Amino acid sequence: MKRVTLGGSGVEVSEICLGTMTFGNQTDEAVAHAQIDRALAVGMTFIDTAEMYPVNPVRRETIGLTEEILGRWLAKTGQRNRVEIATKITGPSQMVRDGAPFGGAEIRACIDASLKRLQTDRIDLYQLHWPVRGSYGFRQNWSYDPSGQSKQRNLDHMADVLQALAEGVRVGKIRAVGLSNESAWGLTRWCDTADRIGGPRMAAIQNEYSLLYRMFDTDLAEVAVNEEVTLLAYSPLAAGLLTGKYSGGALPEGSRAAVDKATGGLGDLGGRRTRRGVAATEAWHDLARDHGWDPLHMAIAWQLTRPFRVVPILGATTLAQLDHLIAGLGRAMPADLVKAIDRLHRDHPLPY
């Protein structure tokens, strides 16, 4: 598998990342460890986790469990030097720190807590899971209102956090830093503030990006190219919507939507499972069939054609699902198919 460098950092990772957000919930520890082994076998050495994982749902009693599962794999196999580990500090959430925002002090404490759970001495990429000032991620774009923000307070917060991150880099606890669920203004200001105070520059931004959700394509893409920041694309299969398994109103047992509904959620894949979303998925499957592609393989391959640096994050509940995704890696996408995908996007813009 090809290797890429995250932004302007010296951290080199595999061009595809293994996501772990189901480890400890829908995916038990034995299967989680088997997934890591399978990923390594094909050169997928980059692994993404987070303080708050597992999710679907997020529960106070399981905070940190995914990191612990990964840590036990590292301790059992002794293969720390073969992998690159990314993790995140949680933004304001009632499940973590009782909803309190994070600053420099919380950054320092949470880095140490993650290192302990991961049973390692370093984190290759440490990310801010979402901005403390708010985010338009997860369908909040429909009602996003930044009017209550204070620019100076935001900049002071960034400086405080970057000073703590700089300390983590200086003592070797973290190698590079990144953002998640961030905006173009936020990414720009994080970079500007790092330059102003001599802090670490953001090497990556982990935002949602898929064939059905292309909000990164304009302002954020321009910032990422000019500031040398790599996109880590989560939900490249639209939380499973692009698999087609929800077509016709289906709700397969054990699926993410079914688990969410069974635990008190809406079962709508975080607002993605809409009438227009399902229609766009059906059109996507028709296009894949016409061009002789598996629709999931086509979704991942398309991301690697983008005019900015992208590392797709592949998350799978089962080993069979991961094997299916791995089987499609390495296939180049022809230019005529890329153009056809752009035409489909015009016909189904922002379907959720």
Image (cartoon, rainbow, N blue to C red):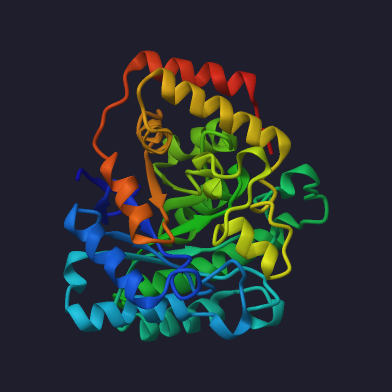
Where does the N terminus fall, quadrant-wise? top left
Q: Position of residue 42 (x, y in %)?
A: 19, 52
Q: Judge from the rendering whether residue 135 lies leftward or rightward of residue 200; answer left or right.
A: right
Comparing 297 with 199, the one in front is 297
Residue at left offset 67%, top offset 70%: 92
Residue at 62 percent across and 56 percent down: it is 257
Please report the residue visible at 54 percent of the width from the left and 39 percent of the height from the top. Answer: 244
Quarter of the view holding residue 159:
bottom right
Above or below residue 158? Residue 217 is above
Residue at 61 percent of width and 39 percent of height:
247
- State the image coordinates of residue 60 (x, y, percent, origin top left): 62, 82
Seen in the picture, residue 10 relative to 337 is either above or below; the reply is: below
On-image quarter of the C terminus: top right
Residue 6 drawn at (x, y percent): 33, 50
Choose between 187 and 35: the one closer to the eye.
35
Q: Nearer the viewer, residue 237 or 198?
A: 237
Residue 39, picture quadrant: bottom left
Location of residue 229 by image quarter: top left
In the visual, does 269 lie left or right of 243? right
Residue 141: x %, y % from top left = 73, 44
Q: How many marks?
A: 0
Q: Is residue 120 visible?
A: no
Q: Is residue 113 left or right of residue 305?
A: right
Position of 211 relative to 15 (above/below) = above
Q: Is residue 335 above or below residue 314?
A: above
Instruction: Note whether residue 11 is visible.
Output: yes
Q: Is 173 displayed left or right of 259 in the figure?
A: left
